Amino acid sequence: MLTAANVARSQYATPATPGVQAARPPSTQQAGDLPGDPASRRSRAGGWTVQPSITLSETYTDNAFPDSEEARADFVTQVTPAIRIEGRTPRLTASFNYAPTALIFARNGEANDVINNLNAYANLEAVERFFFLEGWGYITQTYVSPFAPRPTDIVNTTQNRLETRTLTLSPYVRHEGRDLEYELRNRNIWTNSDQPALGNFRTEQWTGYVAGPVRRFGWALEFNDITITHYDALVNRPSDKARLYRARLYWQPDPAWRLSVSGGSEENNYILGEFQQTTIYGGAVAWRPSTRTTADLEYENRFFGPYRFARFTHRTRLTAWSASYSRNVSTYQQEVLRVPPGDTTALLDSAFAARFPDPDQRRAAVEQFQRSTGTPQFLSSSVAFYTQQVFLNEMVDASFAIIGARNSITLTGFFSEGTQISADALGILPDALSAATVIRQRGFGVYVDHKFTPSTSVGARANRIYSRQEQPVDILTKQDYFNLLLNHTATPKTTLFTGVAISRFDSGNPTIRPNWDSTSVFVGLNHHFY
């Protein structure tokens, strides 16, 4: 979408161009090696690594199917072969991380399935220091509606779960000189799902900027042109189109502070399909007192009212803190690519920064910690829901981590409010915003770990999500999840685990949608071959 460019966030780097919130380069953080071990050294010296692994587990659940009118117990076998390929040459950076999970039901074979998870990224410098080709591939599991069961464990099979696949191709030219920088980029994003009736999305975007260096003062000119197309659905919305032009002036009184003001114009057809033009203006402040603390504040007058963004991060040797607030327009494609609340990988990376200054060693330490303690990658499920509409998204989230010698805690809390901006698709598709003009979600997630010995630990995870629709009918649902996990590192390459999980869904009105609950016990192992 047309966002206010990442003003303060980007002020200490190349000026960012506003646009669809692109997925961050896919994370390649899975099971890794301890800092300094042979595999880690090969990664730095050899340029390319291939890291296969496998996870096997057996689960008994007393209610495997949230959509069923009666509880149906089953034994479920999960097999997850995973492969990670990473490489870096003078002109190519690439990563490929694919981990499909085969679900095999002992009593309900018709539910057997393969759940795909893909995170891939590549950047090719086709012409030295000028022409680049960038690409992402992303497959993840989200949900159609926030008012239906959203099981955390994939052994609980529901039609509300949606597998989304996103491909991004982005050729661009860039020049970075002493006195001038510029970039012209074409970004194409395709998104589809495993439910063909929901249709497909394509975003085509042109962005560009030209900027002078920020010494004490600086400047930048930006533009953004975007078209969002919906196709192959039962009912397709007309294309959403928008364009934006902006100028910025920067002032940096000292290395810790950078301020900017902006002004320009934007137009789009989001409201009633008619083009409307708006004058935009705003300002931003970025504060970098040290490498451990950052703060950003942004404001801009936009067609939907005030755009706002605020963020604060801080770390110590044992802790990491993060808090943010944003108010901006969004689309389903953007929300699918947004990481769920409680990104423990980012928190742990920040907390480990003082102990492991080298990025490769730090990533390996984070991976080892997550594997040995069972810390989940995210503390909450995705809050994305299916919609063909452009909507205004207001979100607050805060996360914290403390890592001790034997005990660790990671936690997050969040609130989001999605408000309809564009017209619906005649209400035929299961679009969450077709019936509701406003959807609110709030919740928390926490994971606590204790080490009995260097190789054995116990962890407890809990999260809750409330979802509310007030118009035209009041709906309030509650999702609960609790997990108790015992981990044992049997060998440097093998981790054994067992535990129990409890899931609850309260529909708020069982006459409209039944409540659902499930208790599961599981046992399994993870082994990596590198």
Image: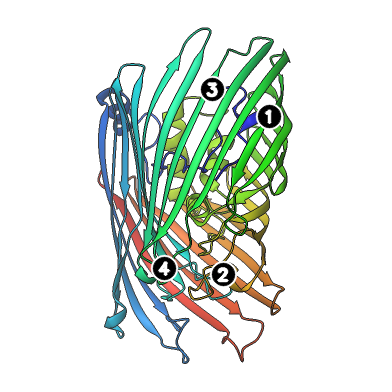
Q: Which residue is drawn at 27% across and 28% down?
A: 42
Image x and y of residue 510, in percent: 62, 89
Q: Is residue 255 above or below residue 320?
A: above
Asked if labels 3 and 2 touch by Cβ distance under 8 angstroms, the answer is no
Asked if labels 2 and 4 touch by Cβ distance under 8 angstroms, the answer is no
Q: Which disc is residue 293 wearing? A: 1
Nearer the observer, 385 or 460: 385
Q: Which of marks 3 and 4 is in front?
A: 4
Any part of residue 315 in sight: no
Asked if labels 3 and 1 touch by Cβ distance under 8 angstroms, the answer is no
- For the residues labelled 4 and 2, the Cα–Cα distance comes to 12 Å
- For the residues labelled 1 and 3, the Cα–Cα distance comes to 20 Å
Q: What element carries label 1?
A: strand
Badge 1 crowding class, 10 Å Cα cut-off, few under 14, some 14 to 19, many 20 or more, is some
Q: Of the residues shown, which amino acid type is indicated by label 3?
A: Thr
Nearer the observer, 220 or 395: 220
Q: Of the residues shown, which amino acid type is indicated by label 1?
A: Thr
> Along the polypeptide, which appears first: circle 1 or circle 4?
4
Task: Identify the residue under disc 3.
Answer: 14
- For the residues labelled 1 and 4, the Cα–Cα distance comes to 43 Å
Q: What element carries label 4?
A: helix
Q: Which disc is residue 198 wearing? A: 4
Image x and y of residue 181, in percent: 50, 16
Q: Nearer the viewer, mark 1 or mark 4?
A: 4
- For the residues labelled 1 and 2, the Cα–Cα distance comes to 38 Å
> Along the polypeptide, which appears first: circle 3 or circle 4?
3
- For the residues labelled 2 and 3, the Cα–Cα distance comes to 37 Å
Q: Is mark 3 on a helix, strand or loop?
A: loop
> Along the polypeptide, which appears first: circle 1 or circle 3?
3
